[in-house]
Amino acid sequence: MTQPNQPQIEAWNGITGNHFVRHRERFEGMFRRLTPHLLRAADVRPDERVLDVGCGAGATTRALAAAAPRGGALGLDVSEPLLAEARRITAEQGPGNAGFALGDAQTYALPAGERDVVVSRFGVMFFADPAAAFGRLAAALRPGGRLAVLCWRTLAENAHFAVPYGAVRGLAPEGAQAEEDPEDREDGSPGPFSLADPDRVRGILAGAGFRDVELRPLDEPVRMAADLDDALDYLLDTPEAARLLAAAPDPTPLRAKATTLLRPAL
């Protein structure tokens, strides 16, 4: 039986999830030019039922539900903090046909054949068992259903990750570097770049039963911050930075050194 993705669940219900809540508007700004590509690929019709995997604070769920006024969208996420934010915003803004559920797509009881479309914006790279997860998503789709996802390409192809990470990667206290290297791992373990290898993605999707798979590289600018100081504040507030600073006997000089290295790199 597939086991829940416990390390990811703990992170997204702790430091990582709270970070994404704090910076919700920033992330929406960062993804503003990417999200329309996802919505066009999903091509949701007015009466369709959509599943949004890794929905976070629900922006994509709300957009998908608005596109399906006679159907609806269900956002699924492992993060209680983000789902609380999603429900709060949706209660204030609607639409009424957007709903949310707490669960891991690897193990969540998705009714077979219930969904017309499965969508995810940067939510499918964190599975411990992607073959099982995508198999369950395929089973949740009706015959002829569709899957549309956004996921990151390699670290080197994403400057907003690579530049700051490259500037400070040598700063980790002894023994902490291996733990705090998830941005750099492209070996398939859960993390932002676990689906960066196109051949691996094709293999996973084919094994899950998906056909007519099309992978499209997107190149869009990502605006991380309003200015340099805002970018520094954000980067030093990331979960990775917080863990490294917490591991240091005295975080003050480490923070100062990171700022010194990041400023010219940015």
Image (tube, rainbow, N blue to C red):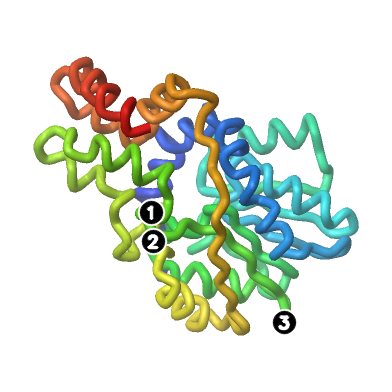
Query: In the rendered image, which quarter is residue 238 located in?
Result: top left
Q: Is residue 234 above or below residue 250?
A: below
Quadrant including the C terminus: top left
**Residue identifier under label 2:** 194
Label 1 sits on what residue type?
Answer: Gly
Question: Residue 159: percent from the left, percent from the top?
Answer: 41, 46
Quadrant including the N terminus: bottom left
Dot 2 alpha-carbon crowd within 10 angstroms: few under 14, some 14 to 19, many 20 or more:
many
Q: Secondary structure at mark 3?
A: strand
Q: Secondary structure at mark 2?
A: loop
Question: Residue 170: percent from the left, percent from the top?
Answer: 17, 38
- Cα distance in 3D space between marks 3 and 1: 30 Å
**Residue identifier under label 3:** 143
> What residue is rendered at 77% in x and 64% in y?
43
**Residue identifier under label 1:** 191
Dot 3 alpha-carbon crowd within 10 angstroms: few under 14, some 14 to 19, many 20 or more:
few
> What residue is rendered at 18% in x and 47% in y?
178
Circle nearer the N terminus (3, 1): 3
Query: In the rendered image, which quarter is residue 82 located in?
Result: top right
